[in-house]
Image (cartoon, grey):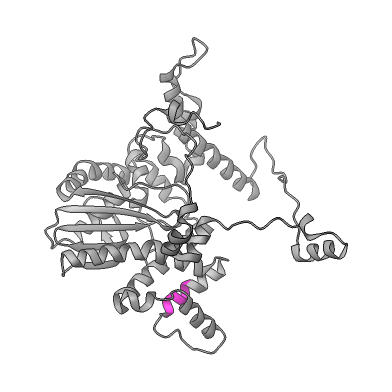
Amino acid sequence: MPTDHAILAPSASKRWMACAPSARLEAAMPQKDTAYTREGTIAHGMAETLLRMALEQGWDKWQADFPDKFRIAYDAANDGKGATIAGLGETLRKYVDDAVAENLDPWEMMQTVSDHYCSYIWEDYLDAKYRDPEAVLLVEVRLKLDEFIPEGYGSSDAVIIYGRSLCVYDLKYGKGVKVSAEKNTQMMCYGLGALLGPAELYDIEEVSLTIIQPRLQWWSNWSIPADRLMDWAKGTLRPRALKAFAGEGDYVPGDHCRFCAVAPRCKALAAQAYALPIDREGGLMDNAELAAALKATTAIKSWIANLEAYALEQALSGKTIPGFKVVEGRSLRTISDPAAAMKALDEAGFDESSYVKPKELKTISDLEKLLKKKGFQELLGPYVIKPQGKPAIVPDDDPRPAMDSAKDDFKDIQL
């Protein structure tokens, strides 16, 4: 599974296409390995291995009672009762070991990617085979993009080719923000790379792009005609990539600054925070000025968070930030040994109900894992409701539909 990154990585294309000089600045920064990136790497490795096993052995053969049978074999191997995990793969065992080393639950991770990612891909593959017996599923596909992006390359988690259709999939294991595939430049780059690479000899007319976020149980799909994707690559992607590779152009702050490594020190982002386009006369903002302030809010909040994190990192490393110091933050008291504390209270004569919380139902996600999706719907479906979410004001390009009448729709919600 590739882990290196191009200077103009497709995953950062939204940023470097909008803010061309940022690519070169980021390339000079050391790559940081975090708990989140390691978790993502393990999840992607598991997903890749499971799909390859499905292709080699057939889905039903290894999916039954999975991952329970793998866990039994894994424990036996670690106890010295089995030298290998027969038929299940040493590669998968490695990712389980990596997850354990990161204090992650490998079995929950394996079940999540199996149920909400691999199953999705496999169902699409079976549908493709039904439509075209010659359909192919490719896993972890290396993509060459240097025809449009200097030194450009990437990898797609899965690709299905059938008839005149090309389907490209991307697994995002994080549980933060739901990501839309519509006009997503990262996905468009992946689609372009697959079109120029593994699908080069096929007469492709339609490119389907899908993002799957298993821990959010969310997927987003968007399709684009192959000729339109090529027009975008020639007219938009290539010229912006050439400018970014050369380090030319202006610094342009925006919501794309969120994951930029140089954001804490970016002068353009700092300037935007201090220079909102608002007329100082009149005392109060009108709605047009309010809109201008809202558009800047996302970038400003991101900049503040990154600025504070970077400054703390510098101070902790021994560097001086004039006028600031590092202090111990607020902490909460905790019980170090709950079992011992409960025993002490019991021996002191207190009734258990006075110091133990009442039993409560587990979360819906936990219950779905317990009952599996079908069993959950049959047993608990009638009791599940989805309350209306609190209103939020977002930019026009947010994929969620606008409410018809916000005042009426949210009249009963307390803000």
Q: Is 319 situated above or below 102?
A: above
Magenta region, main secondary structure: helix
Q: Quadrant of the N terminus?
A: bottom left
Magenta includes 262?
no
On screen, residue 170 versus residue 348, left or right, reads left
Which residue extends farthest left? 203
Instruction: State the image quarter where residue 20 is shown.
Output: top left
On screen, residue 200 versus residue 296, left or right, reads left
Horizontal and vertical percent position of residue 254: 41, 36
- The answer to whether one can see residue 355 in this image is no
Magenta includes 91?
yes
Residue at 46%, 34% in the rendered image: 392
Q: Which residues are magenta?
A: 90-95
Instruction: State the image quarter where residue 268 is shown.
Output: top left
Horizontal and vertical percent position of residue 114: 40, 67
**Numbered disc total:** 0
Q: In front: 57, or 318? A: 57
Residue at 76%, 51% in the rendered image: 333
Which residue extends farthest right? 348
Q: Is 97 situated above or below 84?
A: above
Q: In front: 346, or 93? A: 346
Horizontal and vertical percent position of residue 348: 88, 62
Horizontal and vertical percent position of residue 177: 45, 47
Residue at 21%, 46% in the rendered image: 233
Residue at 35%, 79% in the rendered image: 61
- The answer to whether one can see residue 217 in this image is yes
On screen, residue 115 versus residue 347, left or right, reads left
On screen, residue 22 versus residue 199, left or right, reads right
Which residue extends farthest top? 282
Q: In front: 274, or 227? A: 227
